[in-house]
Image: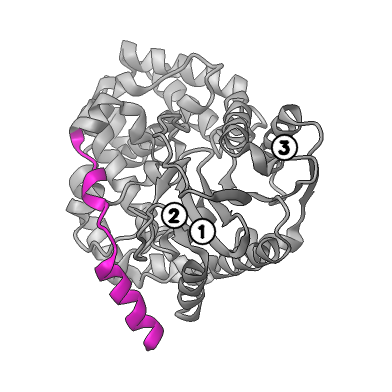
Amino acid sequence: MKQTFSLVLSLLLCPIFTATSQTTKEEMYANIDKTASNYFAYSTDIKPQVAAPKGYEPFYISHYGRHGSRYYINNSDFKNIYDILDSADKAKSLTELGKDVKRRFFVLWDDGQERSGDLTALGFRQQAGIAERMYRNYPSVFGKETEIVAKSTPKARCVLSMGSFCMKLKEMNPAVNISMDASKRDLYYMCYEDKKAREKRMADTAWTNVFGKFHCKYIQPDRFVNSLFSNAEYVQKHIKKTDFMRKIYDISCSMQDVDHVNVSFYDLFTKEELFDNWQVQNAWWYAYAGPCPLNGGKTPYEAADLLAKIIEEADHAVQYGAPNVSLRFGHDIALMSLLSLIHVDNCYTDERNLENLYKVWCDYKIIPMSANLQMVFFKKKGNDDDILVKLLLNENEVGIPLKSGTYPYYKWKEVRDYFLSVIDEK
């Protein structure tokens, strides 16, 4: 109870940052790529960092990153949509636009065969760019004595993301020592999922009743479907309109991640349709991997072992003091849960009205492709016990619910106690 009270007190005392990052329809309309949810390609719109307090030097970086941009997760969907359109074409039930969309899906099917979820060339470049900026921001951490320990989940896109990141660091300084590993053995913390518990939460009627109404309100497929099919009777018999629209929306989201293929589907949607489809997707993520109170808000605690590992490895770095880097390459679910668990700015909210959710919680800001959390540790010269830490989400400085006179820098002892109290709440 003392820990809970301390957490609440900290929340009351800490600065409020949410209002400055609210999302508006106008923002989304200005960059329609943002409606891509977790398929949003990593942005390099990065704000300048605040210099460390005088006398403090960086010595350790703790990182968890999502893999880079990838192919659509189920490329067989390309063939399925193509077959739907081809059957309608043979029945003379496609508009000219529908025939053009059929052609586009053939291109995707041809390019994407057997590549479901594979890292794309853009994903390689994203990871190399993040690594280069990390090196340039903290060059003193990457000396010849530095030990870089990189771990990845066994998924190929994560392993290759790790490889691209580490290759760039080695290119920047061939003297650094890097070890890499990818094993199922580490999945218990690198990407833990209690699938049965999650399925139960997603089936909670308190959630499904609200989400069902929200979904029906914002997914209106008639205009979209009628633009592609010319025969209403054919549509009535053969097309599941909502499913069809949602699937093409899902696929359209991923096109920015395969920038070597000149295919887009944005022209099929109005901006409002894209925004509304994203609202539904954003709400789904809020319940599936975020802190949604409507289905219990327990999912973030699946990242408790990851947070414990972060503390353990930070303790080791603090104890031995040598330049050190911990790199971890995993997935959106684990990162979103972790960020929600520790209440990073704009990654946690207790919003029960889905109509307002997009204003305070946005999936594309939290888990775009190559999303990452970096914790950078600093110590004061002549006093190895005086440790500060700052957090960066997608390379922008962020806060947590602790009071700090040197924001965005926090005392590590206080952050460590806070993290432990979060784990204890599990």
Closer-to-camera residue (216/72): 72
* Secondary structure state at the residue bearing disc 1: strand
Q: Are marks 1 and 3 in contact (CB under 8 Å)?
A: no
Q: CA distance from mark 1 to mark 3?
A: 26 Å
Q: Which residue is mark 2?
A: 409
The span picked out in magenta is: 1-25
Mark 3, secondary structure of its residue: helix
Question: N-terminal of the two: label 2 or label 3?
Answer: 3
Between disc 1 and disc 3, the foreground one is: 1
Residue type indicated by callout 2: Tyr
Element type where label 2 sits in the image:
loop
- The CA span between labels 1 and 2 is 6 Å
| In the depicted structure, whether residue 36 falls above or below residue 186 | above
Q: Nearer the viewer, residue 11 or 379?
A: 379
Q: CA distance from mark 2 to mark 3?
A: 27 Å
**Which residue is drawn at the image coordinates 54% and 51% (left, top)?**
56
Q: Is residue 6 magenta?
A: yes
Identify the mark at residue 166; answer none if there is no mark. Answer: 3
Crowding near the residue tagged with mark 3, few <14, some 14–19, many ≥20 C-alpha atoms within 10 Å? many
Q: Amino acid at mark 3?
A: Cys
